[in-house]
Image: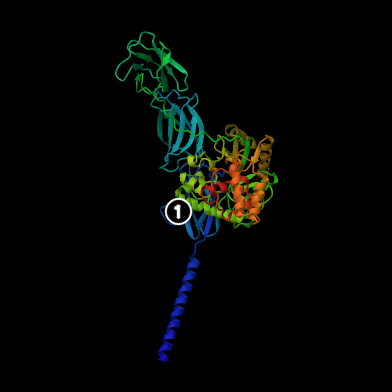
Amino acid sequence: MDKCRSGWNMMEQHLLVVLISIFVLGSFYFVAHAETSGSIVVNITYTNGDRADYWPISMKIYQDNNASPYREISSITGNPFNILSLPLGHQYKIVVYANDMHAADRYVDLEQSQQNLNVNIPLPGGMRVNVLYDDKLTPVENATVEVKSDYNKTWATGTTDAKGQTLRYWISPTTDQSDYYTVNVKVGKTLSYSYSPVFLSPGTPQEVYVITPWPSIVNGLITVKLYNNQSAVISPLPGALTVNLLDYDGNLVSQSPVNARGEAYFYNLKVGDYIFHVIDHKDNSTWPDSNVTIDGTKFSFNIVRNQSNAAVSESSYKKPLIINCNCVAFMLDNIQDYWLDNVQIGILNAFKQKDASLTLGIIVNAFGNDSKLTNSIKNQVNSGNKLFDIGINGWSFEDFTLYDEHHQASLLNQSKSKISSLLGVNSVIFIPPYGRINQDTFSAMKDNGIYYVTTTSDVVPPETLSDKIHSIPVTVFAGYYHLENGTLQYMTNNMIMYQIQSSIQNRGFAVVTLNFQDYALENDTLKVNSPDPSQIKNLESLIDMIRGNGLQIVKVSEIGNKTGVTSEVPPWVKLSAQSWSQGTASNSEFLNTIQFMIKQNIIKSTPSAELKSIPNWLKHNAMWWSSGLISDQEFIHIIEYLIETRII
């Protein structure tokens, strides 16, 4: 029996050793093969060595031999561009497109945390569009021209001059056999013609001739017949009725009396949109206007006295936001660890030296490990003058519109939490990656107490959130622009100042976006992790120029004060918040303070709102507010949100 028991014990020990070995080896296997993330810094140049303009560049990234893209980047935000969060140990195929045209393929074996990739793409071609009537000689003046890719995205727009010509557009050539452009020509509001395929050669100016199907002059007689109703032709006395032919600006082009058969006549007209305006001279009354398009294919038009002749509908247009703050906000986004961090810090220091405000857009998942950059920002946001605003530039710079509301809210929530943990601030600004946003995004912002969104275009929050979320669009782009010969030129301060003044004239404010790559020294076409002293000096001079023109430099969240705050916060209110945060005032005492702010319209809420309880964690925000770490607006937004969601 003892021998049997001893045998079993030995077998159990062997089995235990085998299991431990399997566990250890398995653990070692998984640790050894655990994927960590790296990034690829893509530097894009033209074939002549010049740095490529980044605004028309998009990318598709393929991992290993997969036929479907691992990631798609609809628009890069700078050149060089850092592709973040790519698992190490894989081969990546980077496909670069310019103006939706295939430009280059490159391969990278990603073995390090950050690798550089140089990509050459063809020089832009210069396309000038010449629009002619069907006689192939007469130019079409004042026509609207759009140049679109085969993905139906517009890359150039303009208006033809007296020669029927547009400006020359420098856009990517069509080096791939499947790529082409389409030129759309529009005269007036309804008359349009499309011409394709259009192919473009690299590096050379090129003329594109679009022969429209329209005659330069419609020689046929245009007959207008008037009816009392749908079937009865009117028979007026001589001189009783006149038909005026107006252009769409209301200018008189021609007029014709109506004869006894109820007809008026016009001839030798240009193609385009017109208005028939009927005048009854008996009582000087008018018929409803009738809108028509004359293009040489129709020569007879009927007008019924009682019909509703609605004007040609225009696409809905949202008036741009106008806030008369006479102020300028600077925004520096794509803030991230390690990559050109000395350059990023150099820009921060320039604003600090000038005591000028700056809004930072942080890619949150790519931030916090670079202690040099993190501490530089943290020291500034916690300093006495509070120059910096912190915005969320995505978690991993992802396209938010690819996710539902719940996922978007989760990304914003973890972004806010990490920023609060690292920097001790509450971020209320969202800077959508690639400028993409949808209705779910607004709901996700509201759920996370984010009240400002800034993109490169006007976005309109749903009506139910219009008093909670404010769109403050970027209106000025500092950086490079195309010269007539297709090369890039850095914008001067005078040019930027002109844009700022134009924005303030049209909107009452300006938001200037900066690209930190533009402020780095270069070694040939490669960026060096050191700020360019001349560019930093230009930036400081621009700040002086703005102030010299009597304009205030503010943070994005300070533009317009569109938060519904109509009264100043009395000093004793902050003292009450401080006492409560330190435990020397009770919950009921601070609830009474909140009730006071509601009655004074400082906090927007129902005056009869019954405030019963208050979360203990709010003491942290109250402490930050009373200490000046967050603004009045930010704290009031938090209280409004808590009341609205019945947490208070």
In screen coordinates, is 145 left or right of 230? right
Coloration of the structure image: rainbow
> Which residue of the protein is positioned furthest toward the top in this rendering?
238
Q: Residues within 10 Å of mark 1 (few under 14, many from 20)?
A: some
In screen coordinates, is 553 left or right of 149? right
State the residue in front, 434 or 146. 434
State the residue in front, 344 or 468. 468
Give the residue number, with chain letter if any, for mark 1.
Answer: 70
Q: Quadrant of the N terminus?
A: bottom left
Give coordinates of residue 381: x percent, y percent.
65, 50
The amino acid type, in three-letter code, at marker 1 is: Tyr
* SS label for mark 1: loop
Q: Is residue 377 visible?
A: no
Q: Is residue 224 visible?
A: yes
Give coordinates of residue 289: x percent, y percent.
41, 21
Give coordinates of residue 535: x percent, y percent.
65, 43
In screen coordinates, is 304 left or right of 509? left
Please give the count of numbered marks on the rendered protein.
Answer: 1
State the residue in front, 468 or 304. 468
Residue drawn at the location 68% of the way across and 51% of the way down: 383
The quarter holding residue 255 reads: top left
> Which residue of the protein is positioned furthest toward the left in this rendering?
231
Give coordinates of residue 88: x percent, y percent.
50, 59
